[in-house]
Amino acid sequence: MSVKNEPLSTRKQQSIADFRNEVLAESQGRIDYVSTVLEIEMVDTLVRTLDARRIELGISKAELSRRIAREPSTVRRLFTAGGANPEIAFLAEIAEAVGMRITLEPRN
């Protein structure tokens, strides 16, 4: 049975680092880990880029929320909370509001 599928109640108590190392010891665990890290980095890059553009244009978070018809708290959380996982449609709305667009390009 994979470590990830083992019930929490039957696992021995271990540190997060030990658990990560155990998961990474499995081939699929390594693939899942790297995939998740890359996804998080891509989302973080998008969010940081959009926030930098917002600041460059002098648009407050409150004004941005008005422009995209979203709750101010939603916009604040996106730009201040670490580990945000927004939907692409939400990021596209923000991009449009700050004069940008999200595009895809082939990896080299």
Image (tube, helix red, strand yellow):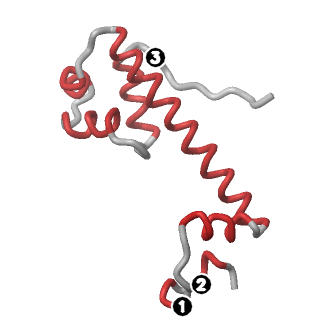
Q: Earlier in the sequence, mark 3 or mark 2?
A: 2
Residue positioned 54% across, 66% down in the render: 16
Picture coordinates of residue 64, whole percent (x, y):
25, 23
Q: Please state if 78 lies on the left or on the right of 8 as rendered.
A: left
State whether residue 79 is above or below residue 6.
above
Q: Which residue is mark 2?
A: 6
Nearest to the observer: residue 75 or residue 19: 19
Q: CA distance from mark 1 to mark 2?
A: 7 Å
Q: Residues within 10 Å of mark 3 (few under 14, many from 20)?
A: some
Depth check, mark 1 against mark 3: the one in front is 1
Horizontal side, residue 77 vs residue 35: left or right: left
65 sits left or right of 108 in the view: left
Query: Please, what secondary structure does the residue beneath circle 2 have?
Result: loop
Q: Is residue 100 above or below residue 29?
A: above
| Res 10 label | 1
Residue 27 pos. (x, y %): 79, 66
Label 1 vs label 3: CA separation? 50 Å
